[in-house]
Amino acid sequence: MGYWWDRVVLPVRRAWLGVASRFGVRQTGLWRLRQEVSTCEYEDVHVMWEMLSRTTAPAPAPAPRRHSRFRPQPRPWGGRFRLCRGF
């Protein structure tokens, strides 16, 4: 069991966590919570879940990106003297 765990399970788990973090796949537990709420026998839990899951207002639009007005002008002598590239 130790060989299997060290040689197979841990590298696969490490690779999966890397891929999941790269693509933004997170385990939020929302699916499990939804299952628990749907199997709950209390009516007030269902009412509260409907209140939470219902959206009345649309999500606000993201603010437009503002570009900086300041752009440094290229220096005329910058292309002629490459002092830092010699090091």
Image (cartoon, helix red, strand yellow):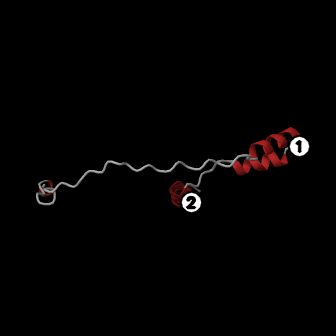
Picture quadrant where residue 82 is located = bottom left
State how many labels appear: 2
Report if residue 42 is visible in the image.
no
Q: Secondary structure at mark 2?
A: helix
Instruction: Tell me the quarter of the image containing the C terminus.
Output: bottom left
| Residue 73 or residue 79, whichever sits in front | 73
For the residue marked with disc 2, what is the amino acid? Trp
Q: Which of the two marks, 1 or 2, is nearer to us in this view?
A: 1
For the residue marked with disc 1, what is the amino acid? Glu
The x and y percentages for residue 7 are 51, 60
Picture quadrant where residue 44 is located = top right
Q: Earlier in the sequence, mark 1 or mark 2?
A: 2
Q: Secondary structure at mark 1?
A: loop
Tell me: 13 left or right of 31: left
Q: Which residue is mark 1?
A: 41
Distance between the alpha carbons at the discs numbered 1 and 2 = 42 Å
* Residue at x-position 62% and y-position 47%: 60
* Residue at x-position 73% and y-position 47%: 55
Report if residue 63 is visible in the image.
yes
- Pointer 1 local density, CA inside 10 Å: few below 14, some 14–19, many at least 20: few
| Residue 58 or residue 81, whichever sits in front | 58
* 15 w.r.t. 69: above or below: below
Tell me: 70 left or right of 63: left
Q: Which residue is mark 2?
A: 4
